[in-house]
Image (cartoon, grey):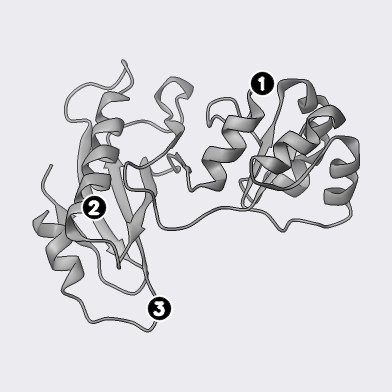
Amino acid sequence: SDAVKLLKSYPDTKFDQTVEVAIHLSIDPRQADQQLRGAVSMPKGVGKSARVACFCPSDKVDAAKAAGAIEAGAEDLVKKIEGGWLDFDVAIASPDMMRFVGKLGRQLGPKGLMPSPKAGTVTPDIETAVAEFAAGKVEYRNDDGGNIHCVVGKMSFSEEDLTENLDYFVNLISKARPAAVKGTFIKNCSISATMTPSVRIAV
């Protein structure tokens, strides 16, 4: 919470900055059993909603849109994306759609938009997934350097809310420690906002 206090003491900007945590882990990202990936709904939200596209059978399109998807469909949605439409932040798919979605590797892969069971974006329960991600559920995954970045809120949040989200996420990551990792798991942790220096956190 001292780190959050320091972060909030930086000069204000004209916009509400996004606050992000970066955690450096002692994992070997080349080993498949040491990779961390998932999605999290922060206890206090993250202050933003996401635009969700949903790949689902035609009989589920209305339900997906009712749950908050900006676009939903099966092969018609695949065609739309092949045609260049990428105006969304998260893609959700029901498992039976992945045979169509697989064709979009070139479009979705480089942007990190490919649905994945580990991230909770390939699921039979598309309505719940769409609603959660539209409400600001965020994905996280380690990078090649063993770091994980995740949004924990906005500068306009109270210190308490930011600290609660931060603690929640750090605990979530420490519980996700791969069995193969020995010794110190979380090497260091820092938070920063869009326009501020980063602040180290004692873990």
Q: Which structural element holds mark 1?
A: loop
Above or below, comparing residue 179 to residue 26 in the picture: above
Image quarter of residue 8: bottom left
Q: CA distance from mark 3 to mark 1?
A: 38 Å
Q: Which mark is residue 161?
A: 2
Q: Type of residue at label 1?
A: Pro
Lateral position of residue 128 relative to residue 70, left or right? left
* CA neighbours of label 2 inside 10 A, class few (<14), some (14 to 19), many (20+): many
Q: Type of residue at label 2?
A: Asp
* CA neighbours of label 1 inside 10 A, class few (<14), some (14 to 19), many (20+): some
Lateral position of residue 127 relative to residue 34, left or right? right
Q: Position of residue 21 (x, y in %)?
A: 30, 52
Above or below, comparing residue 128 to residue 135 in the picture: above
Determine which residue is flagged by label 1: 124
The answer to the question of whether label 3 and label 1 lie on touching residues, with beta carbons closer than 8 A, is: no
Q: CA distance from mark 3 to mark 2?
A: 19 Å
Q: Which mark is residue 54?
A: none
User: Residue at image x 42%, y 31%?
Assistant: 36
As drawn, which residue projects farthest toward the top? 179
Q: Position of residue 50 (x, y in %)?
A: 57, 52
- From the image, which quarter does the C terminus lie in? top left
Q: Nearer the viewer, residue 188 or 91?
A: 91
Determine which residue is flagged by label 3: 15
Which label sits in the foreground, 3 or 2?
Answer: 2
Q: CA distance from mark 1 to mark 2?
A: 32 Å
Query: How many numbered callouts?
Result: 3
Above or below, comparing residue 160 to residue 137 in the picture: below
User: Residue at image x 38%, y 72%?
Assistant: 16
